[in-house]
Image: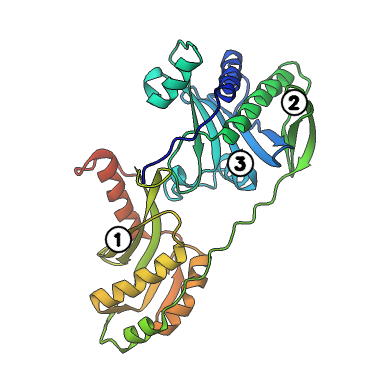
Amino acid sequence: MKPTVPTVPLAVWKDLHSAAQKFHALRPWEMLDDTDLIAVHDASTGETGYGVVMGSGGTLFGFCLYRGAEGFHMYQRLLYGSLDIEEDDFFAVQNCLKIELGPRSDLQPEDHSVIRRLSLRYKGKHAWPEFRSLLPGYAPWFLTEAEARFLTLGLNIACHHHDRINSSDIYDSIRDGECFVYVPVDDARTTFAAQWEAWPTHDSQPQKPPVLNLSRINALRAKKTEPDTPWETDVFYLPSPVFDYERPYYVRVTVICQHSSGFIYQAEPAPPESSVHQLLADAICSSVETHGLIPESIFVKNADAANALTPLAKALGITIRRKKKLSAIRMLKEAMMDSLVYGHGGGRKRK
């Protein structure tokens, strides 16, 4: 299977490009930054987005519309610095719609095709719009019709919000516990009402507990094994997308390392829909089977993983421990990232 580019009517593309041109002409990054949240609610779909203008730093220009409570949670983590860009696989966990304004060379043939069909012309280093959809586990991809319509609404409201700020009609768009939310009030979606609303509550969906194969566990318990020092286990994304699915995705790697030496017992790829806890449980069993070793304990990064793996660990006589920084896996992850990004010789300076 190869990735499929969504079909979007030309009229929808026309509206989106028109909104992008208006946004670019306003140069809102000269007035707004990442503390100016632009919340958008589409009553026709029930979808809410939380937009941020990019460009106040003078490097990346555009607009990012984070989707739903999950998106708002990501925005807050970015704003308040609780997100570790590298450790938390930021490139692979975003849920947003995005327009980036850059050079012509950044666009793909599909982007140029739309621009030609609309008979549009863009000039300038930061004038060519690239529209993309980001979903957790997946690489940036082309918009669907529904996404294009929602991003159009977000851009139009961002322009409206900019004008209100510029005229001193409003001053703040976010305050403790509340944000200013815009809603279109006419069929043309050009007139907007707004009111203060409570921050959305983000309750992350709990991962399913791993399914334990009792016959496999009994076989492991009966297997002649040697005791080993602690292991580390985790699942992380690699930044190189794979194109054998309906939408390009990032491969997740399930890793088990010896804590003291960094020796790799297992490093297996998995598609995006796989359960993290199932991957970890299966990796532990496979490592014991392959190497004939039982660690005295296994380090994991968070409480959810520790709770999910506890039944398996008890059955095998292993202690599960939380450890925020998994040093052996971090070194392996950095080496794999260097290999993918810079080639086999590495090249990134480590702090």
- Image side of residue 147 versus residue 261, left or right: right
Which residue does the numbered mark 2 point to in the structure image? 171
Please name the amino acid that badge 3 sits on. Arg
Q: How is the image coloured?
A: rainbow
Mark 1 residue type: Ala
Name the residue beneath numbered marker 1: 267
* Percent position of residue 156, x then y: 66, 23
**SS state under label 2:** loop
Q: Which residue is mark 3?
A: 67
Q: Earlier in the sequence, mark 2 or mark 3?
A: 3
Closer to us: 316 or 242: 242
At 29% from the left and 67% from the top, the residue drawn is 260
Dot 2 amino acid type: Tyr
Quadrant for residue 168, please give it: top right
Instruction: Determine crowd level at label 3: few under 14, some 14-19, many 20+ residues with C-alpha closer than 10 A.
Output: many
Q: Examine the rendered structure and indicate whether residue 40 appears above or below residue 31.
A: below
Expressed as whole percent of the image width and height from the top left, the position of residue 141 reads 45, 36
Looking at the rendering, in which quadrant would you find the C terminus? top left
The answer to whether the residues at label 2 and label 3 have Cβ atoms under 8 Å apart is no
Circle 3 SS class:
strand
